[in-house]
Amino acid sequence: MRVVVPFAAETPKTRLESVLSPAERSQFARAMLADVLRAIVRAGHEPAVVSTAPLDLAALEMPGEVAAATSLTVDDRPLTEAVNARLPADAGDDPVAVVMADLALATPDALEELLTAGADVAIAPGRGGGTNALVVDQPDFRVDYHGLSYLDHRGIAREVGATLETVDSFRLGTDIDEPADLVEVLVHGRESDRAPAILREFGFELERRDGRVAAVRDGGPTAE
Amino acid sequence: MRVVVPFAAETPKTRLESVLSPAERSQFARAMLADVLRAIVRAGHEPAVVSTAPLDLAALEMPGEVAAATSLTVDDRPLTEAVNARLPADAGDDPVAVVMADLALATPDALEELLTAGADVAIAPGRGGGTNALVVDQPDFRVDYHGLSYLDHRGIAREVGATLETVDSFRLGTDIDEPADLVEVLVHGRESDRAPAILREFGFELERRDGRVAAVRDGGPTAE
């Protein structure tokens, strides 16, 4: 299946600005993108990166088969428009998946669960009412990523008569936006993943404090 | 399967004190407990509530078959000790599950996924490295809920030679601890659930602000 991966190439991950410099945020966002693309390819699908600006895919240093399966388009429209331009438009069109580039915990298994859901629209919600990943196999459904997109997408599916399935996944439900989310990358990232490796290079580690866990950098507290 | 549900009856949900009074926290914690017990019974299992203090189960006003299947013990020891006293101790013992009482989004399907995992130890992790639910089918494994319990439990399983499976569930991964978590109850709670109903009685509703979603009470901002 074609899996669209929108990527904000210019100022990614601004909500991490209290713990990462602009250059580090860019590096970290690209590491997460590389991990997501690899998981998609390992699940047997073809990622189509849709970037807001030109992007050097070679610099991501992905394994050969991942790089070979990945395409890149630049589209500077807002997220909702850029995604809607790529959804099925006619009854016979193939289904299209959309997976956010900051789902650092995504694994081939978790993605497969979503991609084989079978409903006209399948959604993996994120925290705070977001839509972290979805599959659309219906020509009338369109996304709207503003605000409470998970509930909005349920409403849109109802309106156009599409069946809907919610995919229950902690891994797909965890998008990495805020300092507290870095804990999840360090706890659940796998050996071969780039994103946890780069956080450790930056000096982050897990620390237990007052019965809770924080991602701490170079000895100082940064992200609970 | 016997499903232990530990419950802190006296001062539940202290991290919600900025948005709920002590009486409201107590009511809300009991509503979540009732929802969790019902999901366990609907999945075909028997909940064993282990409460830190006497608890009036009848006041939870659960459906008859849920009340009939639920047992109650008072055990004022710390969580780790109270749970370990109830895990399998001998090779022939039945498996035991432990499900936290604040998993307000738990559904029979999500629980069934955990309860049929099949490994010696199956864990549904929560955010921040926590252990929200687990199943133990091995006589040497013991829990330790302090700090990074998910990684600790993986280590303990390795030490005692137990196979381990991590169950990937957004619903079981969402424990309701902090004001921001109330959004999840309002977004993902189902019609028949008590916890979202009681939050709405208290005056909470979802509000979209700056592209994000908050649980807002009586018009004022409270929980992002």
Image (cartoon, coloured by chain):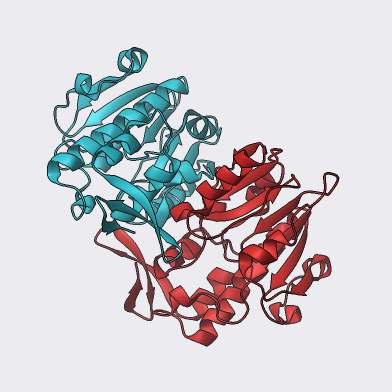
Chain colours: A red, B cyan
Q: Is residue B178 visible?
A: no
In the figure, is residue A11 to the left or right of A107?
A: left
Q: Quadrant of residue A145?
A: bottom right
Q: Residue at x 36, y 13 (%)?
A: B65
Q: Residue at x 23, y 41 (%)?
A: B202
Residue B93, compared with residue A116, is above or below; it is above
In the figure, is residue A212 to the left or right of A142?
A: left
Q: Is residue B196 visible?
A: yes
Residue B133 place in picture, x, y as percent: 41, 39
Residue B59, compared with residue A86, is above or below; it is above
Residue that sits furthest to the right in the current view: A92
Residue B20 place in picture, x, y as percent: 19, 48
Residue A15 place in picture, x, y as percent: 44, 74
Residue B34 place in picture, x, y as percent: 31, 28
Look at the image and tell me in which quarter the N terminus of chain B lies.
top left
Q: Residue at x 45, y 79 (%)?
A: A203
> Depth check: B68 or B123 in front?
B68
Q: Give the number of marks.
A: 0
> Depth check: B97 or A31 in front?
A31
Q: Quadrant of residue A63?
A: bottom right
Look at the image and tell me in which quarter the C terminus of chain B lies.
bottom left
> Depth check: B151 or A64 in front?
A64
In the figure, is residue B173 to the left or right of A139?
A: left
In the figure, is residue B57 to the left or right of A27?
A: left
